[in-house]
Image: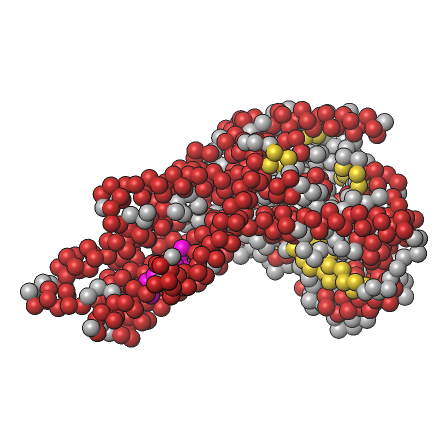
Amino acid sequence: MQSNKKRIWSMLALSAVLGFSLTACSSNNNNASEASDSAGSSTPAASGSAPAASESASADTGIDHSKEVKLVGYLLGEAPKGMSEVMAALNEKLKKDINATLEINYIGWGDVASKYPLILAAGEDVDFVYAADWNYYVQESNKGSYLELTQDMFQKYMPKYYAKQDASAYKAAEIGGKQYMIPTTTPDRKVNVMVLRKDVMEKAGLTNPTKMSELEPYFETIKNDYPGMIPLNLDSQYDLTTPFGNLVSEKFAYPGAPTDSGDPASVGVYTDNEDATGKILSITDEPVQSSYKYAADLMKKWYDAGYVNKNPYSNKVRSKDNFCEGKSGVAFGNSNDIQATLASCKDKGIDTYVIPVLSPSGHAPANSWLNNGIAIAASSKNPERAMEALDLLMQDESYVMIDYYGIEGKNYVVTADNKLALPDGVTSSDNTYPPDAAGFWFVDKDFLKPSVDWTDSYVELYNKIPDYLSQITYLGFTFNSEQNKTEIANLKNVSTQYFMPLAIGAVKDVDSSLGTLADKMKAAGVDKVKTEVEKQAAAFLAAKG
Amino acid sequence: MRDIRKNWLLYLMFLPVAVYFIFFAYVPMAGIVMAFESYTRQGGMFLSEWVGFDNFHYFFASGKAWLVTRNTMVYNVMFLGCYTVFSIVAAVFLSEITRKMFKKISQTLMFLPYFISWVTVSAFVYNFLNYEYGIVNKLLHYMGLEAIDIYSNTSYWYFLLPFLYVWKWVGYGSILYLAAIVGIDQEIYEAATIDGASRFQRITRITLPLLKPTMIILILLGLGRIMRGEFDMFYQLIGNNGLLMDATDIIDTLAFRSLMGSADFGMASSVGVYQSVLTLIIILAANWLVRRYDKEQALF
């Protein structure tokens, strides 16, 4: 009897556990369709809000602020520590000006590709999102994730912005004749840079390096004399293809990313930025082929010599973020986002040397209007108020100082000669709201101020930037890949498997690997993509006149 | 009807499970239509443009469809085999341990990895195995041996992946089997002991045969997942490492890599449908086989 009872209990326990495992697999199986289900169900709300917007616009000209609204926005990156204080300050102003409060959420760098489309698809509680041509603007516009914006809306809800913005910016943001994005009024003036340590340079006997390929003795010195420091300590997202791209740039005006994807780690269809005729190139055309071979050969040499970390795919720390800790020999970034690195190196007493990445003719491509911007989500319930808030956040100096620099007296002070400095007792590494770090990259940058922290080499670079920038042939061109989804999907895959190892130099034989890459791309349908790019590019050039 | 009145308590107990499956397994099945549509927000799930099998095209055009399907199956069969064997061995050992303290501690330690996510595991593994400052290579260095570059050599991963899988799941599996062993009538063991059966004989002649039904059910359930790659594991451990890809690419990672960024729901669901259809075939085949040899043990 005793054992019988025991058996019943244990059978019950077993069936309970089995039940668990059953439900566990079934819930796994349905993850994908569940997510899509919720996307489907939120659609009516989205289509409902669009007519509401146009209705209120036509009804009366005075804007009604009687109802308090809460706006939710998504930006890229991570919230700085001092975010809550900054939000409190912004909300106090917003409440007074347009009776709205703001909540900002962040999509971490590692999750952008997966989370960004999902947040728009789920459509719950999102009014505006960061948008840029390098961040799925075209794809998401095609999917209808953003609210269409008209000139009337800009005029009415974003008067400050409308007054400042150049007419060509609206044109650049059009996808299939409709505009979905609020491009920045001040496209970035920045160039990509590499940062070296002066102490290592001295030891290596390197005086004035101007390009990547001259850095070999520098790497060798690090390898021999600086244990714990990896000359090229690349991360999986940004740095992975950067040294390769910098080497290619020594041979021709390499756009850094193919025209068809805008993703630097991808492969496909290229162009020479400084070729006025705008010929579209594939990987087997010159100058792409020989430049790729040149870059791949050097990278392999460096990889084999141990100058490159062996598994950048698993490394999530960008070289610019551990450069000052002495873990990477070179920091990669652009002239804007490298400022924090330079300042923190200065605090630590490390002298730095900045090299801009330029084309053979000494130029860097100017950034397009779409490089930074913001879009209203199609599901936003208060698109008008969101636009009004953005007008203030982007174009009102008192707002811009807060959202870009933080709280005056706590995160920054303005010196007598109108420069930006840190308050007494605050260092750049414990500043709770470092400039540029909160993701408000689309604000009017004419309000920004030079910093007292800038090193001489940075100031020199900063002053030269306008001379470096050149208007490239395809400035503002965005490829609409709607017709080539299958090919793009497969090209991405080919790129990961066959291009990325080549870019870090981790291949056995460069020539055969380049051959394999070209073959695989052909099989994935790169020619079809090229034809489509050529068609759209020709139309773009014709419209430009 | 009379059956319901008679066994109402059992039906009541079944009700939550039925509700769960209707809402989370059957209703979402309607989402399959998305695999045949060019999904847009305006069209939604049911009104988007119908494109037939276009969404499936990229998967087969990748030239890797067969490779990843094979990898997915081979790895999962390997995982299922190792998991079953090691779980049973562990369960038998645990059941033979009489020191209660020791039994509890070892069981807890075995179960612990189950709670660690693959993200964390991948960080462990990276710090153990990476070329520059991994613990393994540091040890090899002190012993005067050459460092090994695990992250660019496929052969290590044929061993590492099943090893990590077993390490993570064996605690969980052993509990299922242990529950079955506890359910075996103690009188059988007592009788066997009196007849002079050794401990080893008791295990091979009593425990293992009586575990067979549990094993078959668990294997059949495991087969239900055979086309679902262990995405977390492969993605976290291998990531975008092109050098390992031919050996470690599974359906899920291929689809993720190809579609990440474009986030095309139609194309993503097409892979799900492909996996589901293959899974259905495999389960039907496996169940048919079990039925043929032992009707009692089949799932349906």
Q: Between B193 and A50, which is closer to the camera in this rendering?
A: A50
Compared across the picture, whether A179 is left or right of A160 comes to left
Asked where in the image residue B2 lies, by quadrant, the reply is bottom left
The correct choice, above or below, for A33 with respect to A527 in the image is below
Q: Mark yes or no: residue A245 visible.
A: no
Q: Between B292 and A527, which is closer to the camera in this rendering?
A: B292
Q: Mark yes or no: residue A96 visible.
A: yes
Where are the magenta residues, as a range? A13-22
Residue A16 among magenta residues: yes
Residue A469 among magenta residues: no
Compared across the picture, whether A397 is left or right of B13 comes to right
Q: Residue at x 80, y 41 (%)?
A: A179
Q: Main secondary structure of the magenta part?
A: helix
Q: Position of residue A183 (x, y in %)?
A: 80, 46
Q: Position of residue A66 (x, y in %)?
A: 86, 64
Q: Position of residue B264 (x, y in %)?
A: 61, 41
Q: Residue at x 87, y 44 (%)?
A: A151
The correct choice, above or below, for A169 with respect to B62 in the image is below
Coloring scheme used: secondary structure
The correct choice, above or below, for B285 with respect to A26 in the image is above
Q: Residue at x 90, y 51 (%)?
A: A59
Image quarter in which the C terminus of chain A is found: top right
Q: Between B218 and B91, which is closer to the camera in this rendering?
A: B218
Asked where in the image residue B14 lies, by quadrant, the reply is bottom left
